[in-house]
Image: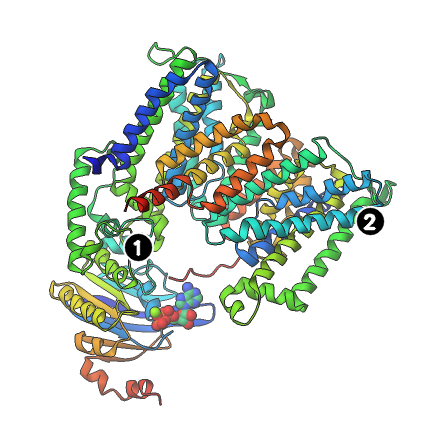
Amino acid sequence: MFEKLNSPRTGGLLALILAVLILPLFFQNTFHYDVAIHVAISATVAISLNLLVGYAGQISLGHAGFFGVGAYSSAILTGWDFGWSPITAMLVASLAVGVLALVVSGPILRLKGHYLAMATLGLGIIIAIVITTEDWLTGGPDGLSVEPLTIFGLSPQGEAQWYWVFCVVLIASVWLSLNLIDSPVGRAMRAVHGSEVAAQVAGVDTTYFKTLIFVMSAMFASLMGSLSAHYSGFVTPDIAGFHHSIELITMVVLGGMASVFGAITGAVILTLLPQMLTGLEDWEMVIFGLILMLTMIFMPKGLVPTLLTKFRRGEA
Amino acid sequence: MSLLKVSGLTKTFGGVHAIEDLSFEIKKGTIHSVIGPNGAGKTTLFNLLTGVYTPTQGAVSFNGESVSGKSPHYLAKRGMSRTFQNLQICMNMSAVENVMVGRHLHMSHNPIAAMLRLPSITKQDKACREKAIELMEFVGTGQYIKTNADAMSYGALKRLEIARALAAEPEILLLDEPAAGLNGTETAEVDELIQKVADSGVTVMLVEHDMKLVMNISDYLLVLDYGKKLAEGTPEEIRNNPAVIAAYLGA
Amino acid sequence: MSVEFLQYLFSGVTIGATYALVGLGFAIIYNASHVINFAQGEFIMIGSMATVSFLAMGMPMPVAILLAVALAVVTGMLLQKFAVAPAKNADVVTIIIITIGASILLRGLAQVFWGKSFHALPAFSGNEPINIAGATIVPQNLWVLGVTLVIVAAVSWFFTKTIIGKAILATSHNADAAKLVGINTNMILLFAFGLSALLGAVAGIIVAPITTTSYEVGIMLGLKGFVAAVLGGLGSGVGAIVGGLILGIAEAMAAGYISSDYKDAVPFVIILFILFFMPSGLFGSRGTERV
Ligand SMILES: Nc1ncnc2c1ncn2[C@@H]1O[C@H](COP(=O)(O)OP(=O)(O)O)[C@@H](O)[C@H]1O
Ligand SMILES: [Mg+2]
């Protein structure tokens, strides 16, 4: 029983559900809900990015590009020009992103280390520049407004309702990811990271699994992009940009690579920290950069894995 | 009948002929050792046979099928399995998971079913874990079942690789210096282990420097020197081969 | 050759020369430590912004430049010593995040002390246009080209002729062996970061009279320098220089003949295209990975 609670799937998931249920008791205004929603959105994207980066060992510095394509596709397709239903738009966008990821994955995933970092970074930047430039479609730097979300006649109203939507999505994605990681598919993915050649001679088609996880995590980012666009009612090009990509990968690395709950922790910190630092005005960037550096220098494996190791050692 | 047939195999790196015009055959159910000084091309030969490197020239046929230039995972599916001279262990996983990866070919990989943790997946995974534990005990690493790979000793990891290779239930097992860096007792254990594997019907190809072990265990030997075949035959024949004596006793 | 073409070529080579210097900085650090320093762009910023601020204090130009370059070099060495060296065994991505943290920190400091506005450095020797075969350039273009040439020559002399240069190369080939023959690899790494900061700062200073500068100028220039280094093949000095020139020229041509909106996308399109066909860049090593 206690052994089970110590496992991420049972214990971790239960703790997350409890946290999600209890937190609203402390929220005093819609701003608190809004921050929590942003944490949930980032956490969900970071989890899917972590599958790619932390578990399968494939760097991506352009993930926000996929997020942005999802968000903009939903904005455009549900807009008055097309008038699609949000759910159709969301699924079509995600499929389109999947196809895009599949097409580029062939050449991109042959690359390793810094070359892969360069290629994904480039891809993300190109997507962001296209979104900024093609203003007849995207509204350019000014952005676009987005229709509200309706799914089967239901439409979340206000931050409090959206909070539950995003929390359910987050919990579902945690559950799905934990299942995937602890399955033959997940083991193959992790083996690609651990030793690509060992995986190959064990019969793992490493190209297939790298592609699979790249496409899945891109499609997931797109879905979250769509959802978040409907929530905020507005999209601007920076959600697809380099800085957002870096923010996402930082969540993964800071919280802990190859740790689902690490990605969530990273999302919490990177969303809350700037809020807490705003009082510092000019010094905000300085302190933020310093905290980022120091954490990574002293905990190169990221917060959650480092703390877990410490905790387990203390226990033993 | 011959399980593996190599003819005119050549691999060059830049100007270096790591393997040059090599031909030989391996019979089913035998232990076939490859010996030769460092840099003779033994590891390169293994890499060519298992598809890790693509041959510059020549042909390899396995069970009558031409397989030169095929990918490692294709060859794994056809029944080839191997270990590495320099450990290739997934340090990001637990010991037992490393062995479970070895059973990859016997598992289904539907990502949707995996994400939903359908009973079919969990049942299969449970069986896979049991089999992996069994193999870890078979190679003598039973005490590490709950350990992370990065917390194991070198000798234990060497054997863990053998367990992973066996997990695939291969027809031929290629072992690249399985006793390198092991002490006397450990070497004797690995010796015994190889014998056990061979007795279970798996064809074994072995690279090893420990001459006592090699001469004891092998049915046939292939001697390489600068990528070329220096001699081939039974341990007895090799022991008496003048070219080998000259090369080994330092002419 | 049309006048138009020549005009684009001149501006392409000018901006390409700066990319080349920044790319060379990436290559030197990569060679010495296999680290990609995402704070590289901040050396450009420090070089140009510090010069602006020293000039404003009333220093003469040469002194301001010298001090600015020195400031960048010291920053580079501090970065190596206190941020990169302690993490030398960390994952590739972890080190990337550390240097990104450093670049945010440096940008933050610049914004605190130098503010957020744009500045132009005065041209080194006037703005009198020069006519070459119908195309016009300003003297600063010549300064950029001249300084770049001198620096590239000096760097190549340094790596082929001096003991320290050879020691850096030896360290990059095999750090353990270098240690064994008595090379102080810690000093080498420090030196590599200093040198690369110097290149970045100089690039930033010579181009600032043409492009203007601000606390954020290092982001895009740094990324494009990274593209130049990868395009040439990571670790190849010649590659980084060729890469930088290709990028600069392609960018200027695209801006001139296609649309200036996509100017910033050009380097990234090029690098994706090249990597599709040459996974280790133009001059990168292409051996079979040893197993
Ligand atoms: N990936 C590679 N790239 C370049 N040269 C290699 C590579 N792999 C092996 N070699 C060279 O091939 C030769 C044979 O090496 P190897 O097969 O490892 O020998 P052995 O296993 O018999 O000690 C050596 O000269 C080695 O340097
Ligand atoms: Mg060898």
Q: In terms of image quadrants, where is residue B5? A: bottom left
Q: Residues within 10 Å of mark 2 (few under 14, many from 20)?
A: few
Q: Are marks 1 and 2 in contact (CB under 8 Å)?
A: no
Depth check, front residue: C157 or C264: C157
Residue A168 lies, with reference to residue C223, above or below; the image says above
Q: Which mark is residue C210?
A: none
Residue B149 lies, in percent from the top left, at 29, 53
Q: Nearer the viewer, residue C51 or A147?
A: C51
Can you identify the residue that label 2 sits on? C62
Q: Secondary structure at mark 2?
A: helix
Left or right: residue C197 versus residue A236 is right
Residue type, numbered disc 1? Ala
Regarding ligand 2, which quadrant of the image does it lie in?
bottom left
The x, y position of residue B7, in whole percent, is 29, 70
- Amino acid type, callout 2: Pro
Q: Is residue C268 visible?
A: yes
The chain holding disc 2 is C
